[in-house]
Amino acid sequence: MIPFLDLKTQYRQIKPQVDDAVLRVMESGQYVLGPQVEAFEERFAAYCGASHCRAVNSGTSALHLALLAAGVGPGDEVITVSMTFVATAAAILYAGAQPVYVDVDPVTWTMDPARVAAAVTPRTKAILPVHLHGLMADMDPIMDIARRHGLVVIEDAAQAHGAEYKGRRAGSIGDLGCFSFYPGKNLGAYGEGGAVTTSRADLAQRIALLRDWGQASKYNHVIAGYNYRMDAIQGAVLNVKMDYIEEWTEARRAVGARYDQLLASSGLARPNPPAHSRHVYHVYAISHPRRDVALKTLQAAGVGVGIHYPVPVHLQKAYADLRFKPGSLPVTERLAGEFLSLPIYPELAPEQAEYVARALDAVPGVEAA
Ligand SMILES: *Cc1c(COP(=O)(O)O)cnc(C)c1O
């Protein structure tokens, strides 16, 4: 049995430090925000190469507040992708704005900048690229379009802690970067968590206000805000994990490289990371022409698999939008029917990756390249 995800093995490796850090929070009497969260914010900002980080209670809250801080509201359009977790689009709707979906690039599976330029209208306020599966979107042309039209860029980096694009980290290129620390993410809390990074002090201050009821000081509410604060326990856990994030990221990349080698002659398409990028493999996805057969074959061999994501946002019942009918985003829609995610985590052994590749080889009906 090779599970799709294994969070307990990692916990066992750091149990003494985590348990100690959590107990210290319990004894401190301060359970929301506070020194543990502040220490984490400082470390995470430095890790991302951003001047500021503000921790919140989920990646979804991070996206919502980043949009509000950027001034996105009713009547505005935000250009994003449909090939993402629904939270990206939901956050745009929470802000009262409209998501405008563009197709993804068939090679990198991230936002196609050529489509972005064509989607800009007088109502466009922001561009929200998603660094899908741990590979950063093509940020240079996206930033160029944004500058030309005076748009804000918000990176959905929920799957891309430590990913790089031309030597710059996720969360440091756009005006704002949004991260999730949901347990299964590359940097995971033991509960919910998220953060916004930015190098603009005004935006950081606005996020800090919005996450804590708009309070400039206790009971002095200067804007209408939310209760999106991070728990102290999650801050303490994340501080412990910051000591390991690079080691774990490199281990993930090694598993990714191992799969690349093992699948080199399989004929199965995978995103081709440009040489200037550091892919952090939140997910190792392949595109399989007989996905459903492959899924069953792997499951029968005891391999945990996933699909990220089987139905793009614009085809989800809850997010249906008359402007984006079936067929409107052909690359996204084709990939949704072909995506298959293999187990990947820092602790996955080389023999396990080999076992997965062999199980995949046994799927009938794919011509070897
Ligand atoms: C996980 C995720 C989110 C949402 O983060 P939560 O912490 O679960 O709210 C947003 N966008 C993407 C791309 C994600 O993978």
Image (cartoon, helix red, strand yellow):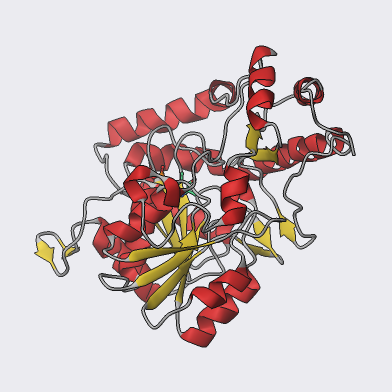
Q: Position of residue 327 (x, y in %)?
A: 53, 54
Residue at 90% in and 39% down? 369
Residue at 58% in and 73% down? 142
Return the residue nearer the eye: 300 or 251.
300
Q: Above or below — where is 264 with respect to 11?
A: below
Residue 5: tell me if it is visible.
Answer: yes
Return the residue nearer the eye: 117 or 239.
117
Q: Residue furthest left?
A: 219
The image quadrant of residue 219 is: bottom left
Q: Above or below — where is 56 with respect to 171?
A: above
Left or right of 217 on screen, residue 291 = right
Q: Position of residue 243 (x, y in %)?
A: 59, 42
The image quadrant of residue 201 is: bottom left
Left or right of 163 on screen, residue 73 = left
Q: Position of residue 174 (x, y in %)?
A: 52, 70
Q: Position of residue 356 (x, y in %)?
A: 75, 23
Residue at 27% in and 50% down? 228
Return the residue nearer the eye: 84 or 332.
332
